[in-house]
Amino acid sequence: MTRSTPAEPGLSKPKTFEDLFSKGLLAVVREDYGRVGSFLAHSVDSRFDLVPQVVRHLIDAGGKRIRPVVHCLAARVCGYDGDGHIVLASVSEMIHSATLFHDDVVDNGKVRRGRPTANDVWGNQIPVLVGDFVFARAFTIMMDNGYFQISRHLGRTVEDLVQGELLQLTHAGNPMLGREVYDEIIRCKTASLFSWCGRAAAMISDLPEERVEALAQVGHHFGMAFQITDDVLDYAGASVDTGKGSCSDLAEGKVTLPLIVAAEQDPSIAADLQVLLAAEDEEDPALAESIAGRVVAGNAVSESIRIAEQHVEAALGGLDAFPPSTEREALAELCRFSLSRIH
Ligand code: FPP
Ligand code: MG
């Protein structure tokens, strides 16, 4: 069996998602990507103009649409040659968008994709309802297209998304929650939808059960690596960006892997975090900076990256079970990309 090979040495590592397209690695799905964009633009019509207006506010802000890309590539890896992947890829982005509308209300988020959040512009009520609408429309589209079994899995995925958010909320501010609980949070809130993207690709391709599970696992590990990388970048900074993390997770009391690893080694971090969060309205930038400094100074970042790398390896290993193809290599490249953002 041929192991998917890493990017050619000497090629500059792509630092942004746009680079991946411009360097041609994802060119195999460029046409699909355009079709998903057109599908999305027509899938949220409503008797209320406000619905497409609020949706456009989010999607025109330039989301990467990485879930549709994963789904389309995965469908191609399975040898799929129909049109159903455009529908399912669009549904994955609709569900993701619905969760972001809700998430920004839950987190009281002010900025998303460099723009004021929908809740900042319209208040909480409108984006909650628009999120509900988009969520319902995604299921209507699935049913209209006869994807009943894939819908069942999507229903379970949305249950996970909600439970991940609940688990995160109930553990807010507790860096002693442990790696297992953290794993479960990110499995639910992020990896589950990527896993569905892989599963749905294998299902529309009528692959046997073990292949369906294998591709669901590829999506799962991709999602785990993707979220851990995001959590590391929040502390360690994006090389593509300012070179400095925003530490917004810490400010929100959101406990992520770098903080958990650092707190395992330095128990004073937990106590300081309690003080920081207890202050609520009174910000204490010096204490926040001190906690973030201790997270970055130790080996928490490298340990977190090591775990993300293990997930990428697992995803690549799962892909090896599929026949070699340009699409398989592109999906492997996308898996490695999630790490290249922090190297
Ligand atoms: C972002 O996490 C949040 C999610 C990926 C999932 C949130 C899910 C819900 C709010 C449930 C929605 C339910 C329905 C029915 C649509 P984050 O806050 O860590 O990421 P961020 O930094 O991008 O805000
Ligand atoms: Mg959030």
Image: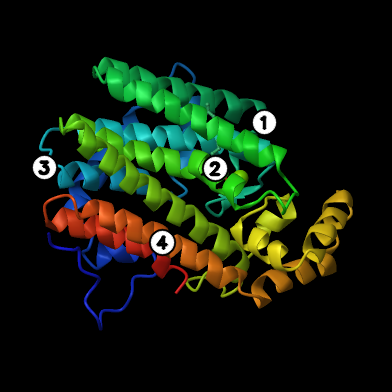
The reply to whether residue 128 is visible in this rendering is yes
Of the residues tagged 4 and 3, which is closer to the observer? 4
Of the residues tagged 4 and 1, which is closer to the observer? 4
Mark 4 CB lies closer than 8 A to ligand 1: no
Relative side of 165 to 211, left or right: right
Element type where label 4 sits in the image = helix
Q: Which residue is mark 1?
A: 124
Mark 4 vs mark 1, CA separation in Å? 39 Å
Q: Amino acid at mark 4?
A: Gln
Element type where label 1 sits in the image = loop
Farthest residue toward the bottom? 10
Q: Quadrant of the N terminus?
A: bottom left
Q: Which residue is mark 3?
A: 79
Q: Earlier in the sequence, mark 3 or mark 2?
A: 3
Q: Which residue is mark 4?
A: 310
Q: Amino acid at mark 2?
A: Glu
Horizontal and vertical percent position of residue 31 = 18, 47
| Above or below for 23 versus 26 | below
Q: Which residue is mark 2?
A: 184
Q: Residue at x 75, y 68 (%)?
A: 266
Of the residues tagged 1 and 2, which is closer to the observer? 2
Relative side of 166 to 275, left or right: left
Mark 4 vs mark 3, CA separation in Å? 27 Å
Q: Residue at x 84, y 53 (%)?
A: 274
Q: Residue at x 60, y 43 (%)?
A: 117
